[in-house]
Image (spheres, helix red, strand yellow):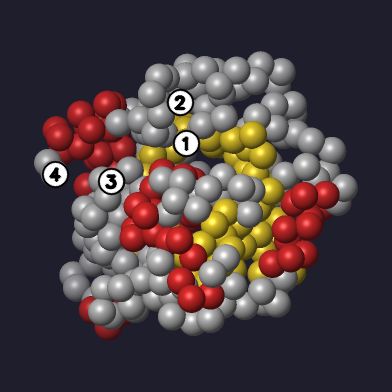
Amino acid sequence: MNLLSLIFFVFTFSFVEGQNNICDPGWVYNDGMCYWSSYLALEEGEPSKLANWYGAELTCRSMLAELPYINNTFEASFVQSLAGCGPSWLGLVYSSVYTSNMTDGHWVWWKTNEEASIEVLSGDDDNCTSHLPSAAYLADGKIIADYPDSLHPFICVKRSHGRPSANNCSPDTLPIGYLDEDSTCCNINLLNPNSFSPKWFYYNGKCYIYSNQTIDYFAAQLNCQENNMHLTSIHNQTDNQIVGINSMCGPSWIGLENINPAELCHPDGWAWEDFSGNSLEGSYTNNWFKNNTGQPSCDQPYQNGYIVPFPVSANANAYYWLSYPTYAEIPFICAHNL
């Protein structure tokens, strides 16, 4: 895909029909900013879009955006989830690229030229060429120095066209993404709000919220139901990516239950606990993690499903399902209709 085709794709692609005035189609909202991912904005089966640091920044500039800068841990988790939980370039550069010792300079955010008050870990210097690792990427919650001609996925960010109104909950005006904390659109009276993310994620008429409680499947199911929600269901590839973004780059329970132990490797053997159907033909093929034979890896006699990132996959789908013992304790994602 050349640069002109990529720009055309970005401005014509949308997760849903229609357009709100907060972010452009295909962009995701968070705290007054809109984000675009080279990883998740691809067609199914297409290799992930990689670029060196200069190419990534140039592509972002062509969309009136920049490579991202990080202000807090929530933002770091969000940016990393948009990259399929793999490495992604940041708008962070070393200001003294021609010195022989990296301690002679300092790291600055490219957009503001402000010194970054964060730790940047040294990368592998075994492949050192004629220049220093003067750019940085985000991976596993850490910021790592790398050579700018290395290839990574990337995120672009720009200011939103406004903020969603705290009380205007029309699907035509709500952006895809994390709603501001003062929004009343998704909020319900959570029994234990400290165990959930401070922000709700909105997409296509549904509100999602992540809990970092590590509990078994039935406890997660009950927790959602006590708060008038269900463990989330997934019905297409975009649903899957949206839920994956909400998983904070770790395994999370989803509402997938085995209803027939004899059909562990067939869609008729699985159903969603919110009674939204057991027709999993398309998503079954695409979303179950595949073993080395190319078949869904569902041969373990486990009763429930969770979603987990596999950023090393060449498939644009960064998030896959695996079956898991009911008694295993991991975080979970609840959802409810707006």
Q: Earlier along the polypeptide chain: callout 4 or callout 3?
A: 4
Q: Position of residue 38 (x, y in %)?
A: 31, 47
Note whether residue 318 is visible.
no
Residue matched to label 2: 23
Percent position of residue 191, x then y:
87, 47
Kindly identify the amino acid type of the residue bearing the numbered disc 1.
Val
The type of residue carrying mark 4 is: Met
Q: Which residue is depicted at the point 36% across and 71% down?
A: 296
Q: Which residue is mark 1?
A: 28
- In terms of depth relative to the viewer, which is nearer, 139 or 18? 18
What residue is drawn where x is 33% and y is 43%? 41
Q: Nearer the viewer, mark 2 or mark 3?
A: 3
Q: Label 3, on which residue?
A: 42
Which element type, helix, strand or loop, lies under badge 2? loop
Q: Which residue is mark 4?
A: 1
The label on residue 238 is none
Taking the image as drawn, is residue 281 in sight?
A: yes
Q: Pointers 1 and 2 in contact (CB under 8 A)?
A: yes
Give the class, few, some or many, for how many residues have Cα within 10 Å of label 2's Cα (few <14, many ≥20): many
Q: Is residue 71 left or right of residue 300?
A: right
**Residue drawn 20% across the image and 29% down it:** 8
Mark 4–mark 2 Cα distance, whole angstroms, equals 24 Å
Mark pair 4, 3: CA separation: 11 Å
| SS assignment at label 1 | strand
Badge 3 marks a residue whose secondary structure is: loop
